[in-house]
Amino acid sequence: MILYYLTHIISSIICKIFFRLEVKGIENIPKKGGVLLVSNHVSNMDPIFIPTVVWRRKFNFLAKEELFRIPIIAAYFRRIKMFPIKRGKGDLGAIKKAIDLLNKGEMLLLFPEGTRSPNGELLPAQPGTAMIALKSGATLVPSYIHGTEKVLPKGAKFPKFKKVTVYFGEPFTLKNNQTSLDSKEKYKIIGEEIMGKIAQLRDSIISK
């Protein structure tokens, strides 16, 4: 855990100095039990900023398998609780790993859209997130990150020093888990519920 916390401290210092990183609603994250954080995704910087603002609990998160191709980097990522996932291929191994972590009472960050939004608009959730949420029964916490679309938009090579704010909404549990539906339709409805919570959080921020 030394490497995990050292990375966290360094990341926190850099993000606060150069990006004026701020967090709102941190009290909405439960202090114990399996928690699935679900966030919008607009930049490759998102997986850095969101864990940086949370000190009360350790984070786990899934990252695209392309980042794990260099052994020494892969070893580092795993030590800071990152795990690879094959995007768009129904990676059942990664999904099982995520469910196991949540069942053990850990916290996991997922981006339900599965990829970065090119224009900031919310995209439909991928079925993997819905499957993890349903099968784990974990408490979900919606998150909305604002500003990373300006720091490092899709296609950009170098970051700009813009302000970033991470918002956490109130925790919730799934309502739409009807067993009468087939899996595809069930996960679609659950995905819509999850993205709906993120949209509500976004709209509450805009209306202020």
Image: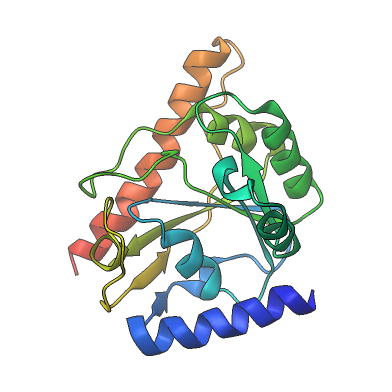
Q: Is residue 107 left or right of residue 170?
A: right
In the picture, residue 77 is in which quadrant? bottom right
**Against 30, is 198 above or below?**
above
Left or right of 142 in this view: 131: right
Q: How is the image coloured?
A: rainbow
Residue beneath the point at 38% across and 80% down: 21
Tell me which residue sits at (78%, 79%) in the image.
Answer: 2
Q: x and y percent of residue 27 in the render?
A: 53, 74
In the drawing, does residue 82 fall left or right of residue 12?
Answer: right
Q: Quadrant of residue 35?
A: bottom right
- Taking depth in this image into account, of 63 and 201 the one nearest to the observer is 63
Relative depth, front residue between 12 and 101: 12
Q: Nearer the viewer, residue 152 or 42?
A: 152
Residue 149 drawn at (x, y percent): 26, 60
Write the residue at 43% across / 60% down: 46
Name the spot of residue 175 as percent of width and height, x first.
Answer: 52, 34
The percent position of residue 52, horizontal first and vertical second, equals 53, 74
Q: In what quadrant of the picture does the N terminus appear?
A: bottom right
* Residue at the image point whose x is 34% and y is 81% from the top: 19
- The C terminus, quarter of image: bottom left
Q: Is residue 144 visible?
A: yes
Visible in this render: residue 169? no
Q: Is residue 174 above or below residue 81?
A: above
Residue 105 shown left or right of residue 159 in the figure: right
